[in-house]
């Protein structure tokens, strides 16, 4: 059994995929995204899953994908923005952090997130009024991200390279290369 070098959490448009991919490259390791895992295992997009099966079904699949990623992946693991809404997932992340793992909360301010998201159709949870939904999401999920994070970084208005450098500098010695 292996564990990830680090786990990225944060709301939609916080930079999890961009920063995660760059971190994996810098660390010479793999990048894994639990949303992609769910899409691969179901053969359906997240947006379609929300429509056809509903959010509770998607969240159950997401919970399984996070547990599998934490147990099997030894690189950089990025979680979907809502993964922390699961108590079981938060428990796994807190345990991982207590065992010496690094959970990075990529936090983003509303104007930056709204600009990055635009009116993207592939973010089904943002619904009819994306800005209002995004504001609500940022406010209600912040305590959940804080609960699991061992490191919090602001990504709004920052270049991905600067965020990557800050994460790399914060990693415990010996975790930056395999």
Image: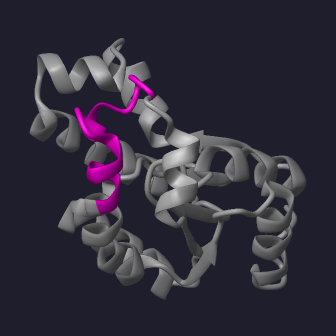
69, above or below 171, in the image: above
Q: Residue 93: which quarter of the image?
A: bottom left
Q: Nearer the viewer, residue 42 or 3?
A: 42
Q: Nearer the viewer, residue 170 or 119?
A: 119
* Quarter of the picture holding the C terminus: bottom right
Give me the residue at 25% from left, 61% from top: 136
Q: Per the image, is 124 magenta?
A: yes
Can residue 129 be seen here? yes
Q: Nearer the viewer, residue 150 or 130?
A: 130
Instruction: Locate residue 156 relative to residue 137 in the image: left or right.
Output: right
Give me the residue at 48% from left, 48% from top: 114
80, above or below 3, in the image: above
Counting from the top left corner in percent of width and height, residue 88 is at 21, 65
Magenta stretch, residue numbers: 120-135
38, above or below 88, in the image: above
Give me the residue at 59% from left, 52% from top: 16
Give me the residue at 40% from left, 52% from top: 81
Counting from the top left corner in percent of width and height, residue 171 is at 76, 79
Counting from the top left corner in percent of width and height, residue 110 is at 46, 61
């Amino acid at each position: 059994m292996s564990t990830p070098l680090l786990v990225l959490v944060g709301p939609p448009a916080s930079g999890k995929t961009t920063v995660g991919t760059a971190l994996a490259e810098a660390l010479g390791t793999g990048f894994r995204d639990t949303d992609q895992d769910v899409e691969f295992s179901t053969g359906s997009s997240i947006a379609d899953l929300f429509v056809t099966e509903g959010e509770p079904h998607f969240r159950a699949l997401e919970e399984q994908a996070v547990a599998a990623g934490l147990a099997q992946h030894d690189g950089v693991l990025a979680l979907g923005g809502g993964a922390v809404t699961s108590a079981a997932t938060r428990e796994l992340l807190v345990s991982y952090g207590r065992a010496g793992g690094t959970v990075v909360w990529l936090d983003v301010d509303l104007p930056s997130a709204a600009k990055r998201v635009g009116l993207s159709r592939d973010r089904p949870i943002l619904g009819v009024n994306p800005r209002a939904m995004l504001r609500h999401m940022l406010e209600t999920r912040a305590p959940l991200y804080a609960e699991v994070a061992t490191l919090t970084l602001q990504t709004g208005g920052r270049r991905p390279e600067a965020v990557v450098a800050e994460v790399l500098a914060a990693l415990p010695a010996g975790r930056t290369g395999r």
